[in-house]
């Protein structure tokens, strides 16, 4: 069995994974309420919370799974906040030494990339390898607060980056837009909630990187456009039109994601299309990308809600499912944190 630890940002998480049965348990301590007052994550407070909560979470995770059953410890080695990553790595190395089991480092972004396949394993662990083979090669879209990227996973499970954002990530653009509109933290879910009651065509926002020659993303211009539009209006008008602003702004972000995903599918041959990352919980985005996959005649996979944010379940799964040499670091007790670890190996 694999015990996994995740502490890349503001979630302390532990999971236990059995390749023969799937995820046996997942435990997460969220820090959203703590950081809400600051409008974003405060690294010092986040690392302190990890220190206080790893012990209780580990005790809960080992209540039903004895330490003697653990054969490997997987821990997020990057990317993320350095102080937060260090807490998880220290805990993993301590447990590895105490139990005399190997410790491996997992790339948080690559774990997101593989997370849409977790439901496939959960449904039938014994048939997972055969079912996965039917879905490769795979095109994936990772959409989170810090990353927006298109990538492929081929038949040998090698991951290759196709494109990424040149500036802000899609989730970051939504959060910044929410802040300009006077909404709370985290902003993305609040934009989605208000957008449901607004008009997506009420306001015009620039469609960045619209040229068909590139798969790259760019969202910084959206935030600037929103700011300029808001500066022209009174607080009363903004309050009255806030839902329309949310709907139009969200539409502009998602239109770029849908357009680039469709273009990537046209340029390659794939058997499945996957969605992962924190923004993957947005139902409007899910519906749009599912439609794109259906139009191209391939399966649509998405990470389940519990595996879209920072979580240890996907870390454990990736530690087992990765096949690319170097995809999982086996440096053991020489393992170091890598705050800027990239999605692709080369």
Image (cartoon, grey):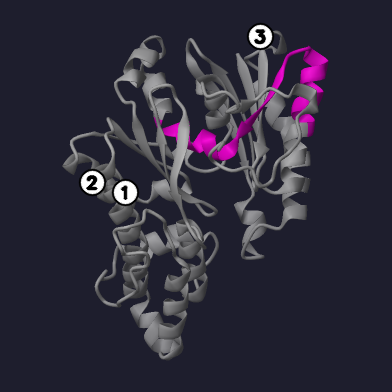
Q: CA distance from mark 3 to mark 1?
A: 42 Å
Q: Residue 50 appears in which quarter of the rendering?
A: top right
Q: Position of residue 78 (x, y in %)?
A: 65, 40
**Residue closest to the eye, 330 or 346:** 346
Q: In the image, is residue 171 above or below residue 194? A: above
**Residue closest to the eye, 146 or 136:** 136
Q: Residue 108 appears in which quarter of the rendering?
A: top right
Q: Is residue 324 left or right of residue 102?
A: left
Residue 261 within the segment the image draws in magenta: no
Q: Position of residue 57 (x, y in %)?
A: 68, 31
Mark 2 touches mark 1? (CB < 8 Å) = yes
Q: Residue at x 43, y 26 (%)?
A: 118
Dominant SS of magenta comes to helix
Q: Tell me the residue that label 1 is attached to.
A: 261
First of labels 2, 3 by sequence position: 3
Looking at the rendered image, the quarter that the C terminus falls into is top right
First of labels 3, 1 by sequence position: 3
Q: CA distance from mark 2 to mark 1?
A: 8 Å
Q: Residue at x 69, y 46 (%)?
A: 339
Q: Which mark is residue 292?
A: 2
Q: Is residue 92 left or right of residue 134?
A: right
SS under mark 2: helix
Q: Residue at x 51, y 68 (%)?
A: 176
SS under mark 1: helix
SS under mark 3: helix
Q: Tell me the residue that label 3 is attached to.
A: 69
Residue 180 visible somewhere in the drawing: yes
Q: Residue at x 79, y 24 (%)?
A: 333
Which span is picked out in magenta? Answer: 90-116
> Which of label 2 and label 1 is nearer to you?
1
Q: Position of residue 84 (x, y in %)?
A: 73, 44
């Amino acid at each position: 069995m694999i015990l996994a630890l995740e502490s890349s940002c503001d979630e302390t998480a532990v999971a236990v994974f059995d390749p023969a049965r799937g995820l046996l348990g997942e435990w997460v301590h969220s820090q959203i309420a703590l950081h809400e007052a600051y409008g974003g994550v405060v690294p010092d407070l986040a690392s302190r919370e990890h220190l206080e909560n790893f012990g209780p979470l580990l005790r809960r995770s080992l209540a039903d799974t004895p330490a003697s059953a653990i054969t490997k410890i997987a821990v997020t080695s990057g990317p993320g906040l350095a102080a937060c990553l260090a807490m998880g790595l220290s805990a993993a190395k301590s447990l590895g030494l105490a139990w005399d089991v190997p410790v491996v480092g997992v790339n948080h972004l690559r774990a997101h990339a593989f997370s849409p396949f977790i439901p496939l394993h959960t449904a039938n662990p014994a048939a997972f390898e055969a079912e996965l083979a039917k879905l490769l090669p795979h095109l994936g879209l990772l959409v989170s607060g810090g990353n927006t990227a298109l990538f492929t996973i081929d038949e040998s499970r090698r991951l290759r980056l196709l494109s990424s954002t040149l500036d802000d990530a899609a989730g970051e653009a939504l959060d910044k837009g929410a802040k300009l509109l006077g909404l709370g933290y985290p902003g993305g879910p609040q934009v989605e909630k208000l957008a449901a009651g607004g008009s997506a065509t009420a306001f015009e926002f620039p469609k960045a990187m619209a040229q068909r020659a590139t798969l790259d993303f760019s969202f910084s211009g959206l935030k600037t456009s929103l700011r300029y539009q808001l500066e022209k209006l009174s607080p009363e008008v903004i309050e009255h039109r806030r839902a329309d602003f949310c709907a139009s702004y969200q539409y502009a972000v998602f239109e770029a994601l849908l357009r680039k995903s469709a273009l990537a599918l046209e340029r390659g041959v794939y058997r499945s299309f996957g969605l992962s990352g924190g923004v993957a919980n947005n139902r409007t985005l899910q519906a749009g990308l599912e439609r794109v996959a259906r139009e191209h005649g391939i399966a649509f996979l998405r990470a389940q809600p519990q595996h879209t944010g920072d979580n240890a379940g996907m870390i454990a799964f990736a530690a087992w499912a990765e096949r690319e040499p170097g995809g999982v670091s086996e440096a053991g007790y020489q393992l170091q944190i890598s705050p800027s670890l990239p999605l692709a190996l080369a």
